Image (cartoon, rainbow, N blue to C red):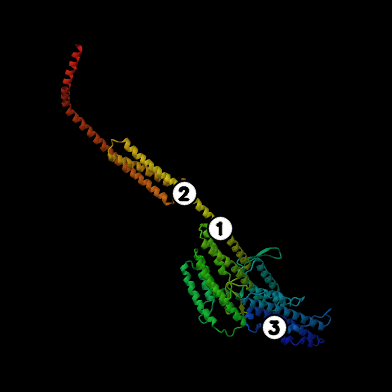
């Protein structure tokens, strides 16, 4: 244990106020003590940095105890001498003070960092301890390696728990790198190795969070680019290799890798069975982990590992829900509620309040409401359910964002053993919390939550307006339908009256035409009226209902009208042929009848003349007798 080595060496070298037992008249003894102070500063810097880089604050059960003992040992550090430094005693006491103050500041900073990590894995809300711990720091006016530890090494390691890095934070890390590069010159081999490890760690952080090159202005006012992929990350490159399943040891990283592959590659809804099978297998090993007594682990490592398993348990179900909302665009509200209820039960069981499922549920419901509004699909009961669910989810979404921010939460976290790689070159376990995933931008998420709330309010208002518009459209449609029915009735009555008067005129004006021809004429009139009705039905949607031509062409009425016109043309041709044939037959019959009548008259003419002369003789005689009487 690196911290324990520092503590034991300090007790051996400086415990029991050994500086007070020096013979200050012996310059060599004073010089030797001074050199021991400088050597210890270098020794403590190396081992404290190795301690934090290896994550022994999580792994070692005695870490907190040793840290407290170390701080208590520093309680007897003397104050610096007042006035000018004139004697060896004053010089030694001043160096002892600088050692104690710098070491105390380093340990207090380390304790603050340790408290931060412990609080991260406590599932209740907490306040950061940095503020009150920093009040205990002892001010010094001297730069030392120990100040490098708490001003550079701890901020670098702390940054790994806040792995969302904006432009400003990226350049702060770049400044830390520049400071290390300047200090690495003219140092011992041990210190140089530690500086190299810190440079590799900063390079690894930048590579994880920055894909594009970093631009900066040099002291010569020239702009240069630093491609993050070209930075040397040393043995931290071992983290870039995804772990494979191990039959002998239960590992959860392969479950995460496979679920990430499913989430990005699967496209069809029925493929969710693959996710279900993976979750079922994870639940089996999850149950085995929960029943394991976990001997040999520190209390913090147990808490950290339990937090990791619980986070992955949530992550797998979150990925499943995210996939479902992505591939199933028409997902029903009932199904969203059922899926979300399962996830909320898991969150209650694990005490992890991840915002992600609420975000997906809110987005799906908002999209669904928007589709209803766009299609003017009014269903009061369904829409009230959707708005009610949004009203419940949005506050929960905001609360979960706050919880995740307070715990610097990431999508998932791996157990301690799966977050370490061994560096043979430095004979050190390199620890990286959550080596495969970064933090979210919680400030941006809070703004997104406000945006969702505004969308909810605006959609509720737009829905009310849309509902009124639909009601108005229904009234307008009803009026149009009434007008259309009136026009239809007028057209029907006009057709009926025209047909009746047409029949009467046909029979009155054609009393000598035979009955079949009259019927044909009547049929012809009927066909003309049918044509009128078809043209009316064909044109009325455009002229009366103001239906656009492009929309009307796609309706069935248009095609029925075209078919009716074609039938009319065929029927007209057929009737024309029939009428023409019947007309010729009628003319031929009339001509034959006239010939027969003429021949009968010719036969009867002689007989009619004889009868006429016999009838006219008595009349002639009577006429002559009358004339004779008048003469007398």
Q: Which residue is mark 1?
A: 464
Measured as percent of width and height from the top left, residue 532 is found at 39, 43
For label 2, the crowd category at 10 Å Cα-Cα, with few meaning under 14, some 14 to 19 and many 20 or more, is few
Camera-near label (2 vs 3) is 2
Q: Report how far apart the C-alphas of labels 2 and 3 lie in the structure.
A: 90 Å
2 vs 1, front mark: 2
Q: Specify whether residue 439 is in view.
A: no
Give residue 553's mark: none
**Given contact means CB atoms under 8 Å apart, are the residues at marks 1 and 3 in contact?**
no
Looking at the image, tell me whether mark 2 or mark 1 is earlier in sequence order: 1
- State how many labels appear: 3
Residue 64, relative to residue 329: is it above or below? below
Choose between 29 and 98: the one closer to the eye.
98
Q: Position of residue 194 (x, y in %)?
A: 66, 77
Left or right, residue 370 beside residue 563: right
- State the residue position of label 2: 482
**Residue 68 numbered mark, or none:** 3
Q: Look at the image and tell me whether residue 279 can be seen.
A: yes
Quick one: 492 or 276, which is closer to the camera?
A: 492
């Amino acid at each position: 244990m690196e911290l324990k080595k520092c503590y034991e060496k300090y007790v051996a070298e400086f415990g029991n106020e050994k500086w007070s037992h020096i013979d200050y008249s012996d310059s060599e003894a004073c010089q030797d003590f001074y050199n021991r102070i400088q050597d210890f500063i270098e020794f403590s810097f190396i081992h404290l940095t190795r301690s934090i880089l290896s994550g022994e604050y999580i792994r070692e059960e005695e870490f907190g105890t040793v840290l407290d003992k170390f701080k208590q040992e520093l309680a007897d550090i003397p104050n610096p001498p007042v006035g000018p430094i004139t004697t060896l005693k004053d010089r030694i006491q001043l160096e002892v003070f600088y050692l104690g103050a710098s070491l105390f500041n380093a340990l207090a900073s380390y304790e603050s960092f340790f408290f931060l990590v412990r609080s991260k894995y406590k599932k209740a809300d907490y306040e950061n301890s940095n503020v009150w711990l920093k009040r205990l720091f002892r001010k010094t006016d001297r730069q030392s390696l120990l100040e490098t530890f708490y001003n550079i090494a701890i901020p670098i390691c702390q940054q790994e728990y806040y792995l969302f890095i904006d432009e400003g934070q990226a350049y702060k890390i770049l400044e830390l790198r520049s400071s290390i590069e300047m200090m690495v010159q003219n140092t011992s081999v041990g210190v140089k190795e530690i500086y190299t490890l810190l440079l590799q760690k900063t390079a690894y952080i930048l590579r994880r969070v920055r894909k594009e090159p970093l631009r900066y202005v040099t002291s010569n006012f020239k702009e240069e680019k630093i491609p993050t992929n070209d930075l040397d990350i040393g043995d931290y490159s071992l983290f870039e290799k995804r772990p494979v399943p191990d039959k002998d040891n239960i590992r959860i990283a392969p479950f995460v890798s496979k679920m990430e592959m499913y989430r990005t590659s699967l496209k069809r809804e029925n493929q969710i069975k693959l996710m279900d099978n993976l979750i079922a297998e994870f639940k089996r090993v999850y149950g085995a982990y929960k029943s394991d007594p976990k001997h040999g682990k520190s209390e913090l490592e147990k808490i950290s590992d339990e937090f990791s398993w619980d986070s992955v348990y949530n992550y797998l179900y979150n990925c499943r829900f995210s996939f479902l909302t992505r591939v199933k665009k028409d997902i029903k509200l009932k199904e969203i509620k059922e899926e979300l209820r399962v996830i909320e039960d898991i969150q209650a069981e694990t005490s992890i309040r991840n915002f992600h499922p609420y975000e997906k549920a809110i987005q799906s419901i908002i999209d669904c409401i928007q589709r209803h509004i766009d299609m003017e699909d009014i269903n009061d009961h369904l829409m009230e359910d959707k708005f009610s669910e949004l009203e419940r989810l949005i506050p929960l979404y905001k609360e979960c964002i706050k919880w995740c921010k307070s715990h610097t939460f990431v999508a998932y976290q791996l157990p301690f053993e799966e977050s370490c790689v061994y560096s043979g070159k430095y004979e050190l376990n390199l620890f990286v919390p959550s080596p495969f995933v970064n933090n979210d931008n919680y400030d941006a998420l809070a703004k997104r939550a406000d945006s969702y709330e505004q969308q909810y309010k605006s959609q509720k208002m737009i829905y009310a307006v849309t509902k009124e518009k639909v009601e108005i459209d229904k009234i307008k449609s009803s009026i149009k339908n009434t007008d259309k029915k009136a026009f239809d009735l007028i057209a029907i009555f006009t057709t009926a009256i025209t047909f009746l008067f047409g029949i009467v005129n046909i029979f009155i004006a054609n009393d000598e035409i035979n009955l079949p021809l009259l019927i044909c004429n009547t049929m012809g009139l009927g066909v003309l009226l049918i044509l009128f009705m078809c043209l009316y039905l064909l044109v009325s949607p455009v002229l009366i209902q103001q239906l656009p031509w492009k929309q009307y062409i796609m309706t069935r009425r248009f095609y029925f009208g075209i078919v009716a016109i074609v039938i009319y043309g065929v029927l007209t041709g057929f009737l024309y042929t029939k009428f023409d044939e019947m007309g010729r037959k009628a003319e031929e019959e009339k001509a034959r009848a006239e010939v027969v009548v003429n021949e009968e008259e010719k036969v009867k003419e002689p007989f009619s003349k004889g009868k006429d002369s016999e009838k006219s003789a008595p009349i002639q005689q009577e006429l002559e007798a009358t004339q004779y009487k008048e003469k007398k």
